[in-house]
Image: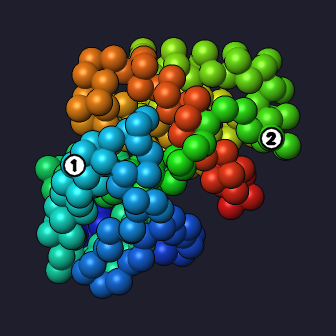
């Protein structure tokens, strides 16, 4: 993206305002949000070893790359979500790299918050009603989420997103994110192999079943509805 086009795009984005999820944007530095629980807190569903690598190496790696890429650029003072939107359609090497790393920073923070110790199972209240209205039943939602996760070819993410008055499941490849498409995410599961290979090897289906049965943070998902 050339600098003139970048400035035009930035003017539009800044005028539109922004939502910031979990990340603090200060000039030149986007911070790594703390995990909402200890690295061992999701055991045995996800081991401390997996969390240590996933958060401490992968998530931090995306963040370090992003901060290097945006340093001394027009992007460095923008909140993370705006950086994602500005670079979502970039075709040039630097723009694509910034998008990929920014989106992965956001996606991972959202993933950590999509889980909690002793989570999983059915939601309650208005969210359960929306799930049942949108999918027919909780079990049908669960099957559709598992099918999307196992059907995602290669690396990516499965999401529960708002869809008008209802909900729907989408999957995104690699770093792609609902933020880039103006969609409101409620929940996500990371289906990159680095998310589960140490604990589940090639059994993505088992990992996603455990995510739904033992990890999902429905309180977080419900809170996203009112964002
Ligand atoms: Fe990941």
Q: Is residue 90 visible?
A: no
Q: Which residue is mark 1?
A: 53
Residue 118, quarter of the rendered image: top right
Which mark, residue 124? 2
Decide which of tag 2 and tag 1 comes sooner along the chain: 1
Identified at 43% across, 19% down, the residue is: 206
Identified at 24% across, 45% down, the residue is: 49
Q: Position of residue 220 (x, y in %)?
A: 63, 53
Q: Is mark 1 within 8 Å of ligand 1?
A: no
Q: Position of residue 218 (x, y in %)?
A: 66, 45
Left/right placement of residue 121 relative to residue 88 reads right
Q: Is residue 121 visible?
A: yes
- For the residues labelled 2 and 1, the Cα–Cα distance comes to 33 Å
Left/right placement of residue 80 relative to residue 163 reads left
Q: Position of residue 133 (x, y in %)?
A: 83, 26
Say which of 58 and 11 sits in front: 58
Left/right placement of residue 27 relative to residue 34 reads left
């Amino acid at each position: 993206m050339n600098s003139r086009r970048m400035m035009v795009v930035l003017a539009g984005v800044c005028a539109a305002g922004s939502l910031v999820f979990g990340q603090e944007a200060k000039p030149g530095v986007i911070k790594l949000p703390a995990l909402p629980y200890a690295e061992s807190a999701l055991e045995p569903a996800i081991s401390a070893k997996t969390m240590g690598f996933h958060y401490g190496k992968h998530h931090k790696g995306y963040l370090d790359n992003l901060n290097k890429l945006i340093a001394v650029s027009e992007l460095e003072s923008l909140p993370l979500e705006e950086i994602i939107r500005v670079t979502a359609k970039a075709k040039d090497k630097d723009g694509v790299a910034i998008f990929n790393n920014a989106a992965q920073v956001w996606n991972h923070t959202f993933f950590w918050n999509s889980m909690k110790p002793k989570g999983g199972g059915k939601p309650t209240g208005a969210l359960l009603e929306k799930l049942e209205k949108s999918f027919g039943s909780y079990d049908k939602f669960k099957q559709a989420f598992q099918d999307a996760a196992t059907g995602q070819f290669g690396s990516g993410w499965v999401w529960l997103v708002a869809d008008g008055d209802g909900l729907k499941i989408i999957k995104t490849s690699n770093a792609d994110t609902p933020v880039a498409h103006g969609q409101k995410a409620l929940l996500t599961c990371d289906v990159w192999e680095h998310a589960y290979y140490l604990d589940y090897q090639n059994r993505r289906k088992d990992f996603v079943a455990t995510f739904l049965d033992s990890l999902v943070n429905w309180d977080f998902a419900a809170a996203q509805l009112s964002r």
